[in-house]
Image (cartoon, rainbow, N blue to C red):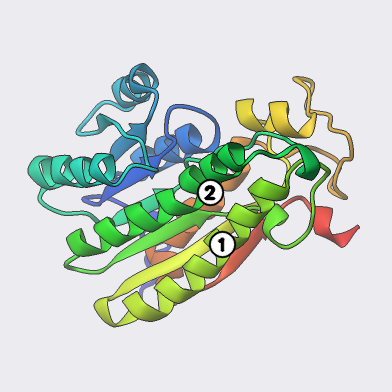
Amino acid sequence: MTIDINGLLDLTGKVAIVTGAASGMGRETARYFAAAGASVVCADWNGPGAEAIAAELGGTSIPVKVDVSDEASVIAMMDRVKTAFGRLDILVNNAALQNRALLTETSVEYWDRIQAVNLRGPFLCLREAAKLMQAGGAVVNISSTGAIHPMMPGLAAYGASKGGVSQLTRNAALELAPAGIRVNAVLPGGVMTEGGAAATGTVPSGRAVTLPPLGRIGMPGDIAAVVLFLVSPAAGYITGQSFVADGGWLLG
């Protein structure tokens, strides 16, 4: 029996959407997917940013400007994917807002905006993506350790939205399994991204308010590697699971 180890992470011929692809974990995930052979739909509300990463990846990758919280915008993105590729194999729901506001200072407008982007967005993208995944597929929702443990004061709205993402993952995995669609979640801890640095107090040196047991803040590539595994043939028997990637922070 010959085992094709190299083929376990091969995405050649696959079409993948990565939301929030203009920066941080989304941008790095798009790079990993392209390196594995996928055509990447670089989706972001930041149109120029989406265009920049798509140009960097080259090949058949394309940019799409999208507001994941808006139903019409998400449907338009899926129509673009269907026109350009005729199929969809992979979805990564990465786009999110991570602003801070103490609970007693949280307005209804702020709360609703966080939920709209962080929870409604993954729901809309997942719902529409499932309609295009006629040959099965793989979905990864980027949740957060904040979904299962408070990270710090000021992230109640964020943590609630990510808790919803984790539960959406489990329910979607159950419903979509008969169609051959796997749905998993990744729960990053502190990661050195533009948004993470602003929200959690990390600084460019890579040091954070509290470092995890592994002794360093996470980098976008740490998360992208887990996402690549979960959408690849290597994870073909995994669905409905939540993978914590936090350098051991939850052990403290």
User: Residue 148: x, y in percent?
Assistant: 72, 63
In terms of image quadrants, where is residue 37?
Answer: top left
Q: Is mark 1 on a helix, strand or loop?
A: helix
User: Residue 149: x, y in percent?
Assistant: 78, 59
Count of numbered labels shown in the rendering: 2
Q: Are marks 1 and 2 in contact (CB under 8 Å)?
A: yes
User: For mark 1, what is the residue?
Assistant: 164
User: Residue 109: x, y in percent?
Assistant: 56, 38
User: Residue 226: x, y in percent?
Assistant: 55, 54
Q: Is mark 2 on a helix, strand or loop?
A: helix
- Give the number of the mark in front: 1 or 2: 2
Q: Which residue is drawn at 65% across and 56% down?
A: 160
Q: In this view, does 155 lie to the left or right of 42?
A: right
Q: In this view, does 135 lie to the left or right of 237?
A: left
Vertically, is 54 above or below 38?
above
Quadrant containing the C terminus is: bottom right
Q: Is residue 174 visible to us here?
A: yes
Compare residues 106 and 76 and report the one nearer the observer.
Answer: 106
Marking on residue 228: none
Q: Is residue 64 left or right of residue 26?
A: left
Q: How many residues crowd mark 2 within 10 Å: few (<14), some (14–19), many (20+)? A: many
What's the distance in space between the residues labelled 1 and 2, CA to CA? 9 Å
Q: What residue type is labelled 1?
A: Gly
Quadrant containing the N terminus is: bottom left
Q: Earlier in the sequence, mark 1 or mark 2?
A: 2
Q: Which amino acid does label 2 sit on?
A: Gln
Q: Which residue is drawn at 35% across and 18% down?
A: 52
Marking on residue 115: 2
Q: Is residue 10 visible to us here?
A: no
Compare residues 246 and 4 and report the one nearer the observer.
Answer: 246
